[in-house]
Image (tube, rainbow, N blue to C red):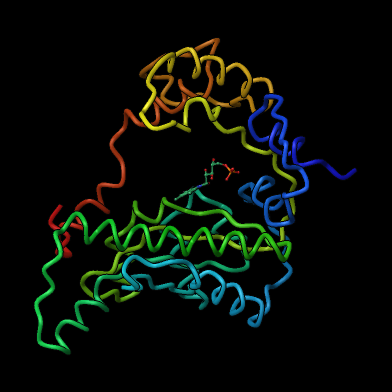
Amino acid sequence: MSHTISDLVSRRFAEHINVDQEQLANETHRLQLQHRSYRQFLTKTVSEETLRLLIACSLSAPSKSDLQQVSIIHLESNQSRDFIQGALPSIPWIETAPVLLLFCGDSHRIQSVCKMHKTNFAHSPIDAFLNTATDTAMVLQNFIIAAEAVGLGCCPISAVREITEQLVEFCQMPKGVYPLAGLCIGYPDEEPDISIRLPMSATLHKNTYDTKNLEAKISNYNMRRQEINPYKTQRQIEKYGSSDTYGWSNDKARQTSKKERLSFDHHIRKQGFDI
Ligand SMILES: Cc1cc2nc3c(=O)[nH]c(=O)nc-3n(C[C@H](O)[C@H](O)[C@H](O)COP(=O)(O)O)c2cc1C
């Protein structure tokens, strides 16, 4: 059955939303509205030609001041795959994904350009870090869209930042380079649910930031989401107990109450991003 764009938008937000400009919507919009992360893959290989096309598409993303501060590392050898599976054993889709890429923020190259031309790199550390991170995130997202357009599925892996120091050493990343996210890629062997997004009344603001009724909007979202994507497990029960009304906000409040990615934090400071 083919869905109208209103159907797809309504499904994404789990509320009825009528899209007036139905005729403006095209296949790219349909693809974006049906995005989901995939964690189960067929063994079917992704050809080298397909991968190069997708990488070319992904590297076509805009770049802050054309600085192009991204590098992609293809973890393709058995040794590389053994290393990353061994370091992140709790993520089985790292093992089963036919392709695994690492999307890295890269300030090394532009600092080499400064050396070539005998200037000193003087951008403020926070701005310099954000420039590399935003460029890399855009290239990552461009890859996902390009991949989904040819029937592939992807799952970003920020857990690589748990093992930043090991990864930097294994991949011999020079100073100024860091892993932002991994990406598992393959032909899907599952049809995951669409993950419901927060209502636009909470995420879209007109002219000024609107904080009104935020808790009510979130509670409402929890309920709508719980009907469609209920949480099967609860985090940190030993600390917070079990909740009968466990929903998105409960899950995220518990998740963010725990320190994580300390290896990344340590690495970033050591690498000269003095933030
Ligand atoms: C930067 C980034 C890092 C992510 N890291 C992980 C990860 O380490 N493990 C995982 O299973 N999913 C990861 N995800 C996928 C998110 O869990 C997923 O995008 C989110 O739950 C929304 O679901 P959807 O992508 O299906 O819409 C990551 C997503 C992003 C954007």
Vertical placement of residue 199 versus 113, above or below:
above
For residue 64, which quarter of the picture? bottom left
Left or right, 32 with reference to 161: right
Q: Where is residue 198 drawn, in percent x and y?
A: 53, 29
Q: Who's the residue at 72% across and 50% down the image? A: 24
Left or right, 262 with reference to 147: left
Q: Nearer the viewer, residue 170 or 21?
A: 21
Q: Who's the residue at 16% across and 57% down the image? A: 269
Q: Where is residue 63 drawn, in percent x and y?
A: 38, 67
Q: Where is residue 203 drawn, in percent x and y?
A: 47, 32
Counting the numbered discs, the total is 0
Q: Who's the residue at 68% across and 51% down the image? A: 29
Q: Who's the residue at 68% across and 56% down the image? A: 28
Vertical placement of residue 260 versus 127, above or below:
above
Identity of the residue furthest to the right in this view: 1
Left or right, 274 with reference to 36: left
Q: Quadrant of the N terminus?
A: top right
Q: Nearer the viewer, residue 183 or 147?
A: 147
For residue 223, which quarter of the picture? top right
Q: Nearer the viewer, residue 5 or 11?
A: 5
Identity of the residue furthest to the top in this view: 244
Left or right, 68 with reference to 246: left
